[in-house]
Image (cartoon, rainbow, N blue to C red):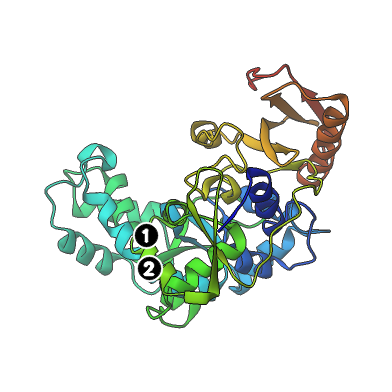
Amino acid sequence: MVKLSNRILNRTLLERQYLLERSALTVPELCDHLIGLQAQDMLPPFVASWSRIRDFDPEAVSKGLDDRSLVRITLMRGTIHLVTPPDALRIAPHIQPELEKIPFRKGFNYGAMVGLDPEEVRAHGDSVLGDEPMPAADLRTHAAARYPDRDPGAVLQTWLYQLPVLQTPPRGRWGDSSRPVWSRVEPWLGTPLDPGYPLAELLLRYLRAFGPATTMDMQTWSKLTGIKKAVESLGDRVRLYTDDRGRTLYDAADTGLADPELPAPVRFLGWYDNALLSHQDRTRIIPDGSAPPLQAFAAQVSSILVDGYLSGIYKIFPERDTARLRISPHTTWSRAERAAVEAEAHALLGFLEPDRTPSVEILDPGANLRP
């Protein structure tokens, strides 16, 4: 089998993620290719789209949520993704059984649900959430009434794992981080879930967007089981490579590999971007292979790619008249790299904060981003 260098894997991932050159795709087309955009918060799918689509209009996402050509739903790794309705309907049945296991483990909310009958809890959730959307606050009130001796937030989260649900607008529109409103998937989209979508087809799409990859990479991305059997069922629709450590890499046979000498422009990612989270071995995009800074992501700290690799973090601090974008490099950048980072930072501020005066601050390597 052909051995692929880390550099080939890096440039191939960036090319398939549209991070080498912005695309002319629409947002639904991008979501379809990437199998969703990470959307745990409002802003990340907008940054992800801006970094991947030429002349991206953020109203395209808002309009898609309103006309239901895009939806926000809990899928891979138990996190919210912005996806097309067909993917919501066909991926959810694969993910749902895994989600339902989460709340009754001892580690979930310090054991808040231990000792309760899962089917009874589900039945109560079924009776509370009908066919109409319901705000999270109302669901929480019902949870407190049904289980007065339990943490209502934990009960609410359990229902959201047990029932196939999605978030409805206004949350997720451009500039709208209002509290979630939840709906069952089928009434909102007007069609039933599709439990017949083969796992093998989903993994083939993963390879087209994230491959070449090992079966452990695929499991890291999806948190599903039965990966190896599903991939092997694809037969000659996949081709095999090895990496520098001799591990088997699978790839979709209808895709090619990127030229390792392709230049990689500076790219700013949103927090939790799937380009960083979708492999067990992350050395193809994170130089030391360490886990992405999830704790920092939770504080809305995001990542910067320089020459195709994670090379710094940034955070935006909107103030009354000014938007400050502070950057902490991981290494010492060359003068040209600093100039490219600064230019892309100003472009991002022009997109996110057009009514504020932009200010870009590049700190010393490893410096704290707090003002």
Q: Quadrant of the C terminus?
A: top right
Residue 71 visible in the picture: no
Which residue is at a point 47% across and 52% down the rendered structure image?
A: 217
**Crowd class of label 2 (few under 14; some 14 to 19; many from 20; radius 10 Å):** many
- Which of 10 and 369 lies nearest the eye of the viewer? 10
Disc 2 to disc 1, C-alpha distance: 8 Å
- Which of 340 and 108 lies nearest the eye of the viewer? 340
**Crowd class of label 1 (few under 14; some 14 to 19; many from 20; radius 10 Å):** some
Residue 368 visible in the picture: yes
Q: Is residue 79 left or right of residue 10?
A: left
- Say which mark, if any, is on residue 216: none
Q: From the image, tell me which residue sits under label 1.
A: 224
| Tag 2 near tag 1, CB within 8 Å | yes
- Which of 253 and 122 lies nearest the eye of the viewer? 253
Q: Quadrant of the N terminus?
A: bottom right
Which residue is at a point 20% across and 66% down the rendered structure image?
A: 123
> Label 1 sits on what residue type?
Leu
> Label 2 sits on what residue type?
His
- Which of 185 and 236 lies nearest the eye of the viewer? 236
Q: Is residue 200 left or right of residue 150?
A: right
> What x and y, as percent, mark residue 104?
21, 50
Give the quadrant of residue 259.
bottom right
Q: Is residue 62 above or below residue 175?
A: below
> What x and y, as percent, mark residue 204?
52, 69
Q: Is residue 23 left or right of residue 185?
A: right
Give the quadrant of residue 162.
bottom left
Q: From the image, tell me which residue sits under label 2.
A: 94
Of the residues tagged 2 and 1, which is closer to the observer? 1
In primary-sequence order, the first of circles 2 and 1 is 2
Which residue is at a point 60% across and 49% down the rendered structure image?
A: 275
Which residue is at a point 85% across and 35% down the rendered structure image?
A: 340
In this view, the residue farthest toward the front is 1
